[in-house]
Amino acid sequence: MDNRPEILYESKHTAADLEQLRNTHKIWVERNEYDSQLEELFFINNPAAKFDPNKDKLLADFISGRTKASKNFTGNYIYYPWRGGFVHVLEEDEYFKVRTNRNRNIISEEDQRKLYNANVAILGLSIGGGMAANLAYSGIARNMKLADFDTLSLSNLNRVQESVMDLGQTKSGIVAHRIYEANPYANLKFYEKGLNDSNLSEFINGDPKPGLIFEEIDDFEMKIRIRLEAKKAGVPVIMLTNLGDRLLIDVERYDLDKDLAVFNGLIGNLDEEILNKPITEEDKKKYAILLVGKENLPKNVYASVLEINKTLVGRPQVMSTVSMGTGLASYLARRLFLEKLDSGRKLIDISSFI
């Protein structure tokens, strides 16, 4: 199934193109709230007009002026093949302005535009998929690279906000649908077979080169390789790790310090061990503990790691902490692109606040 929407642009297409699409594509749902979007745009541009006694006429004139401006159609039409949906929306700049308006003045218009034009790569789309969607809804990173080889399984639904209707579908495809339905103008590049030696360099250095990588995978060897490649390219890496009711934040600013050791030097020579020997199932448990630090693990999470492949099939995670991490991803991206965000490790323990 196609993971990209089809767009008919007011500047490029005609009414005949519109009719042809209607006649040749399966359309199960059509939405046309274009006038209401124009109304929002009008009051965003003229907030004081809400109190003008002539506001109804001013609004009507604005809408009629727009809809009469073209002999074909105004605005753009978006067709979503996976949904059979057809929707009429504002062109990209106006769509962006209305969709992000409620971010003001927490985020200035200038900063919002910088964030929108940022390039972000995300490796691992279980938790990373939530991060990608959160970035998109926040108006951050129109350009994203998304990498994951896996498909959605039922056990993912304790922490991945998706539908049972999506079981068996690729995680990259599912995330793409979420992002495109929030922002049909997004520019997404997919790595549906994950990363390997043949595409790792292109993922980091290829166009568009990411200004930030979120790493959210379980593959220990790739965790190291992605950092070594990011270090050479000068691209920062952020990892958010869910530890029961704790969240561990690792920030590695390779863009500011190319001599920075992987994982901020917190793992000693463990990176060399991971890359230079076959990894057993027992090694995976050991590395999982060493990478985050035993001191950061709640007792029940530490005990759970030791039970993997005995009484547990995987590392336990809960939605409450995962949700906090997906929101923090957008905050951290804002800090990194707009303000100051230093390398280092921070631990958030929810129980210490409540």
Image (spheres, rainbow, N blue to C red):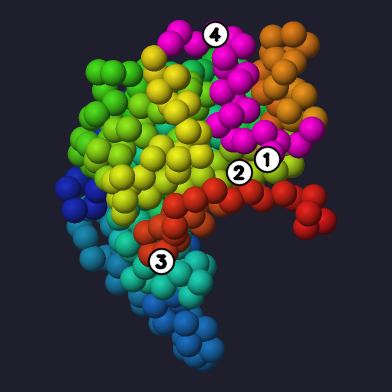
* Image marks 1 and 2: residues in contact by CB distance under 8 Å: yes
State yes or no: residue 24 in magenta. Answer: no
Label 3 crowd bin: few (<14), some (14–19), many (20+), radius 10 Å: few
Rendered location of residue 287, percent (x, y)? 56, 23
Horizontal arrangement in the rendering, residue 107 relative to residue 144 (left or right): right
The residue under the point 27% across, 65% down is: 68
Task: List the residue tagged with mark 4.
Answer: 280
> Which is in the foreground here, disc 4 or disc 3?
4
Residue 263 visible in the shown view: yes
Query: In the rendered structure, which disc, 4 or 2, sits on the residue that comes first in sequence?
Result: 2
Which amino acid type corresponds to the residue marked 4 in the rendered image? Thr
**Region in magenta:** 277-299
| Pointer 3 residue | 339
Q: Give whichever of 293, 207 is nearer the camera.
A: 293
**Mark found first going from the N terminus, 3 or 2:** 2
Report the Cα–Cα distance between label 3 and label 2: 21 Å
Residue of label 1: 296
- Residue at 74% x, 15% y is 307
Expressed as whole percent of the image width and height from the top left, the position of residue 243 reads 68, 36
Query: Is 159 above or below relative to 187?
Result: above
Query: Around disc 1, counting alpha carbons within 10 Å, would you say few (fewer than 14), some (14 to 19), or many (20 or more)?
Result: some
Q: Earlier in the sequence, mark 4 or mark 3?
A: 4
- Residue behind mark 2: 248
Distance in Å between CA atoms under marks 1 and 4: 24 Å
The Cα–Cα distance between marks 1 and 2, rounded to whole angstroms, is 8 Å
